[in-house]
Image: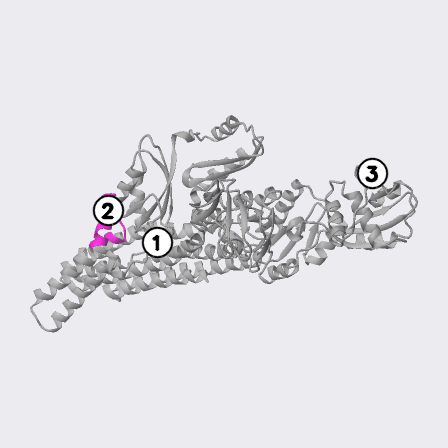
Amino acid sequence: MDCADCAVQIEEAVSRVRGVKSAKVYLGSSTLVVTPESEGLDMSAIAQQVKKLGYGIEDDEAVARVTLYVEGMDCADEVEVIDKKLKGMEGVRGYQVNLVNQSLNLVYEPALVSPQDIVRAIAETGMKARLERAKRQVTPWWQERRIVLLFISGVFTLTGFILGWLGLPHWADQVAFGAAIVTGGYYPARMGLAGLRGLKLNIYTLLIAAALGAIALGLWHEAALLVVIYSLGSVLESYAVDKARGSLRALMAVVPREALVKRDGEEVVLPVEQVKVGDIIIVRPGEKVPLDGVVVAGASTVDQAPVTGESIPVSKNEGDEVFAATINQRGSLEVRVTKLSQDTTLAKVIHSVEEAEARKSSYQRFAETFGRYYTPAMFGLAFLTAVVPSAFGQPFTPWFYRGLVVLVVSCSCGLVLSVPVAVVAAITNAARRGILIKGGAYLEAASGLKAVLFDKTGTLTIGRPQVTDVVTFNSSREEVLSLAAAIESRSEHPLADAIVRRAKEEGNSLPEVAEFEAITGLGARARVNGSLYYIGSRRLFESLSVPLAGAEKELSRLESEGKTAVLLGNERSALGVIAVADQLRPEAAEAIGALKQAGIKHVVMLTGDSEGTARAIARQAGVDEYYAQLLPDDKVELVKGLKAKYGRVAMVGDGVNDAPAMATADVGIAMGAAGTDVAIETADLALMSDDLSRIPYALKLSRRSMANIKQNIASALVIVAFLVPAALSGFVDLVPGLLINESGMLIVIANGLRLLR
């Protein structure tokens, strides 16, 4: 299983197996993850489907997975060195490289190889691997080996120029330049040799070859400058890329490492890793919540910005959910832990951000493919430049020199690195604002959206019906609300809760109810204070032949506004009507307007509600089109039809009930994903809060990101298009060529980092 098409085939085949809710293939680890609809999933049926496609199934117990963090893995050339090393190792089944995060996700056979064996193998390449992420420490520059060697090399180079200027014997400055080459070239030489051992040419090999070539021509000063300039560029490149890594570390740093736990009647401080589900933790005012949980005692306001991006603190009372890394502001809270430290909402967000580079955009794939072939091609071109002209009678030395210049301008790190740096910067920017973007592929897809589809209930609307009107006929408001709430207090209907809640909010007392009976599809009846009352739809009262002429005007008005009219009365007349509606989110209309300003051509609302309700909400929200009375399968078909009509479309829903439609769309966007594992897993973009205004921000960010990436690729290619002909024509010398190449690399990486802002 080596390509995206293979993965799609498997996902589609397995998704058709009865009892499978979803299927997802991870190419990097050759893993199929299946989410069942219920227990008792037939795994043999899944295996049979996979085998029909020509693939094998391997026992998961025979393999293990580990993540290694590799220091010094800063460029595609270093990745290729590791790639060459691991491909020859027995027991290494597959791996996925995250260059920006400096990590390797490996699948291996414990019976044949251990993680320690893999760490030792990577050490042979000159890089250092760890099983755990190294703790971030601020190290003085004089303790950084690469920087110290660069400084010494620079001093020796400067000394060589001073000795030459003073007119001392030529051998004196050669010794100084030689010392500069040895000290500054130590790291590149080590990496270059590791590449050669794996029969792989990389930028380090080319640099050392160019330096040796310059020495052969007697150009000691140019060889020393090559090493110094390259080493300086490499250090600055690592620093720039580390800015993107630092943004990821900042996300992780907000999580407390300890929790105050109630154990056996005592309060003890424990590492969060030792806290169990069900433990009670205490969060004092001003402290961060260490783990996800539910408030069991106390009340406070909590700043949820680190997780959801919400700027306004949220009130928390008993029964409310709280998330790790959010900040308790006022009161003390006791929280029952619901998730282990590795399973918290923020942990899942961080994990998704770290894994985002695996879902590459077409631009990332282009940059990697270009880099893979460009360096060997340049080595071949340099060889031909140095050798072929002399075969036709041209002087050897100038053409050999031009060949060396071609070597030093052949580094493609700027192009290869600038794209993942820009992607990680954009994704981290979004994560800080409560928007989870699952990878560069979805960033690219979002940038090209033409239409956005919204589910109505719980997405465009709040999702909790509320009483909007109480109209009375020969009765008081208090009497109508009290009677209605008393009867509805016995009902399980969603609208009943809204009526009971409003009556209690207005301080109405509820009379005793007897002989309650639900009337399926119509409403209910009950005796209150000895009298029989009915509550329900217009059809209920029409079936009882209750005259509604006096109520008709109000009923028509409320229904035209998209509200559900609930009548209350007896067998003789209607006493009043209560209108219940699911309210539009306050920011919905503004967010839809912002989407249109951002270039979205068409906004559509989908709902299973009636035509009247859909029309009213659509008018308030400002959508271009709406579809009512839809079943889940209808939504899927509509998404397909709108994709054919408009091109790329996004589906916005809750990530659970709308999962099929979201999976069909080019980009699935889940609302209110904080605390909802399924939404985080299934969505391509997940909004951690219920704030619709985050969607226009995410789309604008995606477009800015793609523009930035295109700028980087174009700039890198322009530099290549200038330097290679300039080197061949003798227009650019060794040192200026390397300076231009290294400067261009740093510029495009720095441009990608602008997306952090």
Q: Residue at x 61, y 60 (%)?
A: 596
Label 2 crowd bin: few (<14), some (14–19), many (20+), radius 10 Å? many
What SS does tag 2 mark?
helix
Q: Choose the circle earlier in sequence order: 2 or 1.
A: 1
What SS does tag 1 mark?
loop
Identify the amino acid type marked 2.
Ala
Q: Which residue is mark 3?
A: 514
Quadrant for the N terminus, please: top left
Mark 2 and mark 1 in contact? Answer it, CB < 8 Å: no
Q: Which stretch did the figure color magenta?
A: 186-205
Mark 1 and mark 3 in contact? Answer it, CB < 8 Å: no
Residue 421 image point, x, y percent: 40, 56
Which of 345 and 242 lies nearest the eye of the viewer? 345
Q: Which residue is mark 1?
A: 136
What SS does tag 3 mark?
strand
Q: Which residue is mark 2?
A: 194
Q: Residue at x 60, y 61 (%)?
A: 594
Identify the amino acid type marked 3.
Ala
